[in-house]
Amino acid sequence: MAKDFIYLDYAASTPTDPRVTGRMQECRKSAFANPSSNHVAGRISRATIERAAQQLAALLNVDPDTLIWTSGATESDNLGIAGAARFRSHRGKHLVTLLTEHKAVTDVFRMLEKQGFEVTWLKPDDDGRLQPATFARALREDTQLASVMHVNNETGVMQDIEAIGSICREHDVLFHVDAAQAVGKVPIDLQALPVDLLSLTAHKFYGPKGIGALYIADRPGCRVEPILFGGGQQQRIRPGTLPAELIAGLGLAAEIAEARIEADLGHLYKLRRRLWAGIRDVDGILVNGEVESGFPGILNVSVSDVEGESLLLELEPICVATGSACNSKSQEPSYVLRALGRSDLLAQSAIRFSMGRPTTGNEVDYAARRYREAVARLRDLAPAAAL
Amino acid sequence: MSGDPYSALVRDLFADTAHAGDLPGGVTADIDAQGVRVRLSATQDEGRIKALRFRAWGCPHLIAACEHLCSRYEGRPRESLSEFRAADIMRDLSVPVEKTGRILVLEDALRSLGRRFGGGSAP
């Protein structure tokens, strides 16, 4: 069947790699048994999971025993942040995070605020980056946990995880990283990076949806309280029957990513430059984030005098994301872009192009042409009175 | 398409805005409210609306509603402008209720246009 759309929304989700799909189909037959069972079928499922843990561990350069399987990054963020904050609450109730984190992080901090924790919300610079010195100034004697995302899901801005993590280590603050947009896309060496907790999900790097993991460093004081209850699986940190088929898919996706991560990055750098070259002369265009640095799979742009929802429809059949909540019930501008200093109107006009492994130069050229045409048409439709 | 926020009619009207533009020398009404902007221009001939054009800055439902309205009112008696009801066009185009304010802006623009015709200033 011919494709009836151009997909440039890889930051939202990626298609499952056919090899991963094949592996999961095999496991559907061979590893269906409950991996907690001690019979031979259960042992096959357990072995399948252990192999996947080794594959993911190799990608991150960690011990497989430091990985806890979850349903995805949202659950990993919840478990890592709420679990660690509660475990260490006797040491203090001050937490630090960024205004531009994903909702899966910010909503957990909001919940913790209601439970008596105090949160310092840091605002990044206008380019989206958090200065390590700004972060350091936010720490207090009673700070016990900080969370900063690696790659921002809207802008692609990458934070200096190494510098921020080092500050955390100096102050004995646990450091959680939401790496949903980073794992499998940019090299991550957790032996070298001072990170205590790291969240990831498979479907962002060509694995299946519904499976993710939380890395918990094997070091003193780095523990989490469970947020789910009902069994003894995974050291009681995250109970529940493990889906061997999904975990196997994640494992193979990690192995594939490890093998081609540099090639993928090179491909994305070329595509982003090509896309930007195609639209940079549009009058009033503004990059949300950075063009040359940051994760190359994302280019987020706003443009003056154009309404975002109409721009999105005019761009069809190109699948991109907008700077609004993107449903008919809410046109609230992106809080991430507002935190970067964008006006409501500029934030609403934002389009996030996100490219992936299958993206071609022709697709990018087509998107650039359609973007220019769409902006021109909507401006032509608008009353002459300036905003 | 399941879950499509736009009806087929809205998509068609948004894609083909034959009535977009201005009518130099015509009567105009501009409204800037509810986060949208609408300009209607009209000319009349012997008490009937000869031509009706729009410009709009807003969501696809608003732009589709402008096109729908212009195509429906051309050729009708100018008094009919006061008969416009936002509820009718919201029903015709399946506009979500949360966008009612934007369609009411269009209603205000049309009534403003009618008043200007009624004031005798129309060409």
Image (spheres, rainbow, N blue to C red):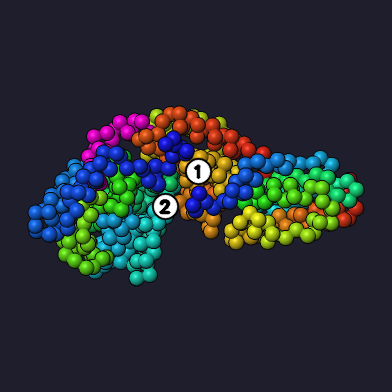
Judging depth in this view, the residue of A343 and A360 nearest the camera is: A360
Judging depth in this view, the residue of A251 and A349 nearest the camera is: A251
Task: Tell me the amino acid under the disc marked 1.
Answer: Ile
Q: In this image, A289 relative to A311: left or right?
A: left
Horizontal and vertical percent for residue A279? 52, 33
What secondary structure do most residues of the magenta stretch adopt? helix
Residue located at (86% from left, 47% from top): B44
- Checking the image for residue A351, the label placed there is 1
Which SS class for mark 2? Answer: loop
The range drawn in magenta is A248-268
Horizontal and vertical percent for residue A365? 48, 30
Horizontal and vertical percent for residue A235? 16, 61
Magenta segment includes A267: yes
The residue to which callout 2 is attached is: A100
Mark 2 vs 1, N-terminal side: 2
User: In the rendered image, is residue A156 in sight?
Assistant: no
- Read off the chain for label 2: A
Circle 2 Cα neighbour tier, 10 Å, few/some/many (<14 / 14–19 / ≥20): many
Which SS class for mark 1? Answer: strand
- Marks 2 and 1 close (CB-CB < 8 Å): no
Instruction: Give the total number of marks visible in the rendering.
Output: 2
Outermost residue toward the left?
Answer: A39
Circle 1 Cα neighbour tier, 10 Å, few/some/many (<14 / 14–19 / ≥20): many
- Read off the chain for label 1: A
Task: Tell me the amino acid under the disc marked 2.
Answer: Thr
